[in-house]
């Protein structure tokens, strides 16, 4: 579809941002080639150019501006709502199903909002994330060629706006309309009509109220054009037609065409109901409960007035927040202090309700509040909610708010009611931590404040290292007659800083080997750990490093130590993976040469001990989950000869009693003599059969993934060497548990011979002490 000239033109653009910008211009120059103009014209839409440079479609022949709120003058949905059909929050999903299911779209269940299958993102940030990266790359079959999904997503870049602007959330449902089809099956006109019919016939919105923008999209090297549906300044949804990928030779048409339509369920519910803001449309039951306790009534007139201008307070676009409040106050003709006094408690209620909903989903789906990675975002919103509760001295328990959400959402998401007791316990511990910090804070602050001024950097440091929020600093500063300036985007700055420091940690060093022309190594260690020798051809020798055509030797990976052994009776002391090559490091320069046929022999005892420790790790993981609860996920593991450890997500130290119970459960699994089931399975099949729990050890690449199943106990995608039967693990002994970072506890243990050796050592020690 792209001419050679255009391909050449686009070849220069490497970043998604550049591609998006350039492709928008190209597509709008030739709309008939890129947009469903036939359908648009048949529906009576006319194409126009807005002063902002965007081409848009409208049925009004006199309309001059596009639907963007900056061009058309803010949101206008509250006072004179254009939607004839009022849809509750859950109705929005039902309506999509009603219109699209008969047209061949399969409704599917949401994926977890903690994206364990995805190596690039911790949280699910869009409906299409559920299918990234492997469906998009064609490695995995999609659940259906055409589907719809109510995907709960989390994004933490706008925390300060939540509650204030009336349309910002950290957690939201993006309803996805997706198609994954070949170019022959691709029918852009029909895909467009399906959504147009949804909004026009399903929601009953008159065409006069709809404005459709021409735009483009680019992400992860793919790009295409898009149509954005607007009404009354509200972007209702965006339909992206992903058709090309960028390569070094320029753009190429994708073999799998992807439709990515994302519709904000909260937004459309709000639009349809015309409530003063998105929160009122999304969780009215939760807000009712909160109002009963706090006695904070909604001043509807004031809020309706305020909500028309609250977009001015969007932190992304405002430099001076005080001036923005002044501007809003002036617009609605009220004193700014009076406005804040009345509006702030209302917005605090919204924030508490919104944050509780995100916490409910995130914890339910396997993420804990902590000081690390994505867990940190959860801590930030939890503490923001608690700060509001404390500020207004409300008797509100966030765990209760979570359970009200679960009740309100039961019809659509029954699974979030499954672990409410556990979530309550987790939030209780988190609250205790918060207050302990607060107590400690007083002393620290007095010392710092005596010295005077506090910089933003110090504020961030205080929050980051000691959990002291800017509000606490402000409060303490009053005594010293100091005014503290807190940046409006404080929490974003904190999160940003965390992301930076974690990226630095993630960068490692690697050696460079030139292996052009050398075929990859075939791994022979996946099926039976007792097979410890093989014949192989030597393909490449670089100094002491040997690459064979195939090998039973296990390279260090997945937290499991490498094998040792011999090649032609010469010792190898290390094995590592280099891409898809297995590299053996010999203790001396090899006597054999490239092209020779050699005999590989892995040390049997070494191999067995590692297999015992690895299978024991899966067993202990299952036992810990049974004893401590479903929030237990593997966060890391290491298996060596002497011992093994497993890091699990847990919110406090593990008690002695619980440790003993875990050990007992683990040994029960050993004694049950269960045969392990090890197999390579197509990824889509594995996900269908076991769910995304298989990725708890981390995301794994490849079209076929290796599944390690202890039937009835545990299943995981894992590449390690495993026993054939649990009884071969011998006795499992938990030697230690320690909190290694916030929200993560390390369990150290031994199995098999290592346990026996440990016992003997202990007995010897006791003997020595006695004598
Ligand atoms: Zn415009
Ligand atoms: Zn494993």
Image (cartoon, rainbow, N blue to C red):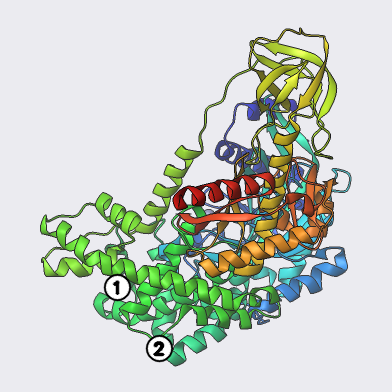
State which quadrant residue 340 falls in.
bottom left
| Secondary element at tag 1 | helix
Residue 294 is tagged as 2
Residue drawn at x 74%, y 76% is: 94
Q: Nearer the viewer, mark 2 or mark 1?
A: 2
Q: Position of residue 741 (x, y in %)?
A: 45, 53
Residue drawn at x 11%, y 65% is: 480
Residue with the most extreme front position: 771
Judging depth in this view, the residue of 544 and 458 nearest the camera is 544
Judging depth in this view, the residue of 452 and 179 nearest the camera is 452
Q: Is residue 304 left or right of residue 331?
A: right
Residue 330 is tagged as 1
Q: Is residue 281 left or right of residue 192?
A: left
Q: Looking at the image, tell me whether mark 2 or mark 1 is earlier in sequence order.
A: 2
| Secondary element at tag 2 | helix
The reply to whether residue 77 is in sight is no
């Amino acid at each position: 579809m792209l001419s050679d000239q255009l391909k050449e033109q686009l070849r220069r653009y490497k970043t998604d941002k550049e591609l998006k910008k350039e492709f928008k211009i190209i597509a709008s120059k030739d709309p008939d080639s890129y947009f469903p103009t036939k359908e648009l014209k048949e529906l009576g839409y006319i194409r126009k150019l807005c002063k902002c440079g965007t081409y848009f479609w409208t049925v009004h022949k006199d309309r001059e501006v596009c639907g963007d709120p900056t061009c058309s003058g803010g949101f206008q949905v509250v006072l004179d709502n254009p939607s004839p059909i009022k849809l509750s929050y859950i109705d929005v999903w039902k309506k999509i199903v009603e219109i699209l299911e008969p047209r061949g779209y399969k409704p599917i269940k949401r994926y977890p909002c903690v994206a364990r299958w995805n190596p690039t993102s911790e949280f699910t940030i869009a409906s299409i994330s559920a299918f990234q990266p492997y469906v998009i790359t064609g490695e995995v079959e999609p659940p259906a060629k055409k589907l719809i999904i109510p995907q709960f997503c989390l994004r933490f870049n706008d925390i300060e706006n939540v509650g204030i602007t009336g349309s910002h959330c950290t957690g939201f449902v993006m309803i996805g309309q997706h198609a994954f089809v070949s170019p022959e099956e691709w029918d852009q006109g029909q895909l467009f009509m399906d959504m147009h019919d949804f909004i026009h016939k399903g929601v009953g919105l008159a065409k006069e109220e709809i404005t459709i923008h021409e735009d483009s999209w680019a992400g992860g090297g793919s790009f295409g054009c898009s149509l954005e549906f607007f009404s009354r300044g509200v972007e209702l949804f965006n339909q992206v037609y992903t058709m090309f990928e960028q390569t070094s030779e320029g753009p190429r048409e994708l073999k799998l065409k992807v439709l990515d339509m994302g519709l904000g369920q909260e937004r459309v519910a709000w639009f349809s109901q015309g409530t003063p803001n998105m929160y009122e449309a999304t969780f009215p039951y939760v807000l009712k409960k909160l109002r009963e306790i706090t006695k904070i009534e909604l001043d509807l007139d004031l809020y309706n007035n305020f909500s028309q201008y609250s977009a001015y307070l969007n932190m992304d676009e405002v430099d001076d927040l005080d001036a923005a409040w002044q501007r809003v106050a002036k617009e609605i003709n009220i004193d700014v202090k009076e406005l804040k006094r009345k509006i702030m408690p209302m917005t605090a209620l919204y924030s508490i309700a919104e944050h509780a909903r995100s916490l409910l989903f995130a914890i339910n789906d396997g993420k804990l509040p902590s000081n690390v990675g994505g867990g940190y975002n959860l801590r930030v919103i939890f503490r923001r909610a608690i700060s509001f509760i404390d500020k207004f001295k409300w008797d509100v328990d966030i765990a209760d708010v979570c359970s009200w959400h679960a009740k309100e959402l039961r019809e659509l998401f029954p699974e979030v009611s499954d672990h409410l007791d556990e979530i309550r316990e987790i939030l209780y511990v988190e609250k205790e931590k918060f207050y302990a910090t607060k107590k400690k804070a007083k002393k620290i602050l007095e010392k710092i404040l005596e010295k005077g001024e506090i910089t933003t950097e110090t504020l961030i440091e205080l929050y980051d290292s000691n959990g002291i929020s800017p509000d606490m600093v402000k409060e303490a500063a009053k005594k010293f007659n100091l005014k503290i300036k807190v940046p409006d985007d404080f929490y974003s700055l904190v999160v940003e800083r965390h992301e930076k420091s974690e990226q630095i940690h993630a960068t490692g060093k690697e050696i460079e080997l030139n292996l052009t022309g050398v075929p990859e190594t075939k791994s022979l260690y996946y099926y039976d750990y007792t097979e410890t020798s093989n014949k192989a051809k030597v393909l490449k020798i670089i100094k002491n490093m040997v690459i064979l055509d195939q090998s039973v030797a296990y390279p260090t990976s997945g937290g499991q130590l490498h094998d040792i052994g011999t090649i032609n009776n010469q010792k190898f002391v290390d094995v590592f993976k280099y891409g898809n090559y297995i590299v053996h490091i010999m203790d001396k320069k090899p006597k054999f040469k490239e092209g020779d046929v050699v005999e590989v022999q892995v040390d049997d005892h070494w191999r067995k001990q590692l297999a015992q420790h690895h299978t024991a790790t899966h067993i202990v993981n299952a036992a810990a989950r049974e004893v401590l609860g479903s929030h237990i996920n593997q966060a890391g593991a290491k298996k060596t000869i002497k011992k093994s450890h497993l890091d699990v997500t847990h919110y406090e130290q593990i008690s002695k009693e619980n440790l003993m119970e875990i050990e007992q459960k683990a040994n029960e699994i050993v004694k049950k003599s269960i045969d392990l089931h090890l197999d390579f399975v197509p990824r889509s099949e594995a996900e269908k059969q076991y769910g995304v729990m298989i990725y708890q050890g981390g995301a794994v690449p490849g079209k076929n993934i290796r599944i390690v199943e202890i039937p009835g106990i545990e299943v995981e995608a894992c590449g390690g060497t495993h026993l054939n039967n649990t009884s071969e693990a011998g006795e499992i002994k938990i030697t230690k548990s320690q909190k290694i970072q916030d929200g993560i506890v390390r369990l150290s243990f031994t199995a098999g011979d290592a346990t026996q050796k440990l016992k003997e050592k202990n007995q010897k020690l006791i003997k020595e002490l006695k004598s």
